[in-house]
Image (cartoon, rainbow, N blue to C red):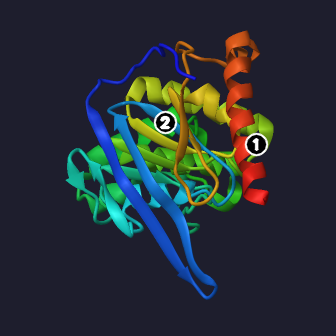
Amino acid sequence: MAGNSEHLSTGVIKVQAKDVKKIYPTSRGDVVALNGFQLDIKENEFICVVGPSGCGKSTILNIMAGLEKPTSGEVLVDGKSVNGPGAERGVVFQQYALFPWLTVKKNVEFGLHLKKLPKEEIGRISDHYIKMVELQDFKNAYPKELSGGMKQRVAIARAYAMNPSLLLLDEPFGALDAQTRTQLQTELLNTWETERKTCFFITHDVEEAVILAQRVIIMSARPGRIKEIVDVDIPYPRTQETKLTRRFGEIKNHVWSEVYNEYLEQRK
């Protein structure tokens, strides 16, 4: 199901996943999490990945992040093989992973200190991204004083502050209530259109995938591989009102149907 999506990407290939296979040995035998995952992602492109639980979505993200190694195949970022974590790749997980003893500002600045940037530049960068996620009134607050949505904003600001060219997001809004989730979807879209990062976003929420992505990757049931790539031919900027359009409904229903079929296949 492809269309002529209004691509805001440059056309330059940013990420290449080449025939990636991942096997986990277990006491009950080997589990094949990924089998022949192959994908090119363009620079500045927004990709969302959906599929049934256990289909390897988080596994491929962790391999791209350098947190896991493939059993065979490889992932290239800017033409270089990924062999471990790197500053050019920012990662945001569902768990906020903030330092509870640091304020919002200090959390955002943490990685900048590791880069040994001048103090004034660190302050300027952190203030910029704290304002971007609308937390300037909370920059001196500690994580325990923040709501779940605010904590996730801090995690996103921290990732952006490192100026990565590739953002890897593993269900970053999965633990949030519907209203907060909707708000952060809008903020992330606005930020992506301004900052122009390549985004690889994993979600269980089909509606979320369609509102955010230029292309939606549908994964098959385990062993994980790409079942279909859906081009979301809905122009940007997108708003929550976009979800009410007929075309949005058509694409969402198609993606949901394919994911549900894989879920049923998994249960056989």
- Report x, y in % for residue 214: 50, 26
**In what quadrant of the picture does the C terminus appear?**
bottom right
**15 or 236: nearer the eye?**
15
Count the marks: how many? Answer: 2
Q: Quadrant of residue 87?
A: bottom left
Res 64 visible = yes
**In what quadrant of the picture does the N terminus appear?**
top right
Give whichever of discs 2 and 1 has the lower sequence position. 2
Residue at 57 percent of width and 34 percent of height:
134
Alpha carbon separation for disc pair 2 and 1? 20 Å
Q: Amino acid at mark 2?
A: Ile
**74 or 29: nearer the eye?**
29
**221 or 48: nearer the eye?**
221
Residue at 42 percent of width and 44 percent of height:
167
Q: Is residue 168 above or below residue 13?
A: below
Report whether 22 appears left or right of 52: left
- SS class, disc 1: helix
Contact flag, marks 2 and 1 (Cβ < 8 Å): no
Disc ID at residue 47: 2
Neighbourhood count class around disc 1 (C-alpha, 10 Å): few under 14, some 14–19, many 20 upward: some
Q: Amino acid at mark 1?
A: Tyr
Residue at 78 percent of width and 50 percent of height:
264
Disc ID at residue 260: 1
